[in-house]
Image (cartoon, helix red, strand yellow):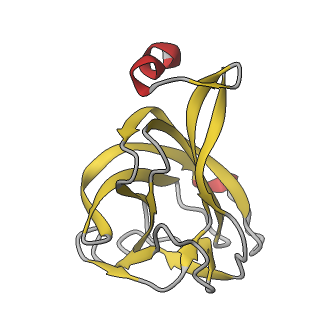
Amino acid sequence: MGYTLKDNHDTNNTFLSGIFNTAWAAMTFTASDSYTITKVSLLIYRAATAPANVVASIRATTAGVPSGADLCEGSVVGSTLTTNSAGTWIEFDLGVGTALTSGVKYSVCLRPDENIGIYWRVDTASGYANGNMCTDNASGTSWTTRTYDGAFRTYSISAGGVFVPHYYQKLLAG
């Protein structure tokens, strides 16, 4: 069993967006087809001191910004992030994930669990046509749309390189 890359933007990542415990960031994206998102990868790094955990979640959107509760989430231990400002692609396992609908806009939200900085590499040329970066200084309750794009990759579970519909993926994830 493996993963299939679904939606992504991973070019021209020359800038960064700082994220702290109440200052979150998100990247909206439009689902390219209907699939269950089970993993997301983000180009990020951390400050010299590491937060205990870093959380990535998927949320619905309203008026182009994240809205509602997390549909699914995953976390990594903060000390596993590099301090190199070029960042590294960090994978967040979203468990059984959540079903996405083709053509609908969703968001990948990123936040640490304490007031220690992490940084998301972004494209200031706004090269991603199907979404945009958003920031919030109130723990995910008051989002602002930005004119740049975060580096992200979304995945669904596949078996033998063949796409597996979302209703079977929960069985495969076991």
Camera sees residue 38: yes
Residue plotted at (45% across, 73% down): 20
* Residue 23: percent from left, percent from top: 39, 75
* Residue 64: percent from left, percent from top: 32, 71
- In the picture, measured across the screen, residue 7 lies left or right of residue 63, that is right
* Residue 5: percent from left, percent from top: 64, 43
Q: Please tell me which residue lies in front, 111 or 132.
A: 132
Residue plotted at (57% across, 81% down): 126
Camera sees residue 110: no
* Figure disc tally: 0
Q: Please tell me which residue lies in front, 114 or 100.
A: 100
- In the picture, measured across the screen, residue 14 lies left or right of residue 126, that is right
* Residue 160: percent from left, percent from top: 70, 19
Say above or below: 53 vs 110: above
Residue 49: name its quadrant: bottom right
Residue plotted at (33% across, 82% down): 144
Residue plotted at (44% across, 84% down): 146
Residue 65: name its quadrant: bottom left
Say above or below: 82 vs 14: above
Say above or below: 127 vs 46: below
Say above or below: 109 vs 171: below
Quarter of the N terminus within the rendering: top right
- In the picture, measured across the screen, residue 108 lies left or right of residue 153, that is left
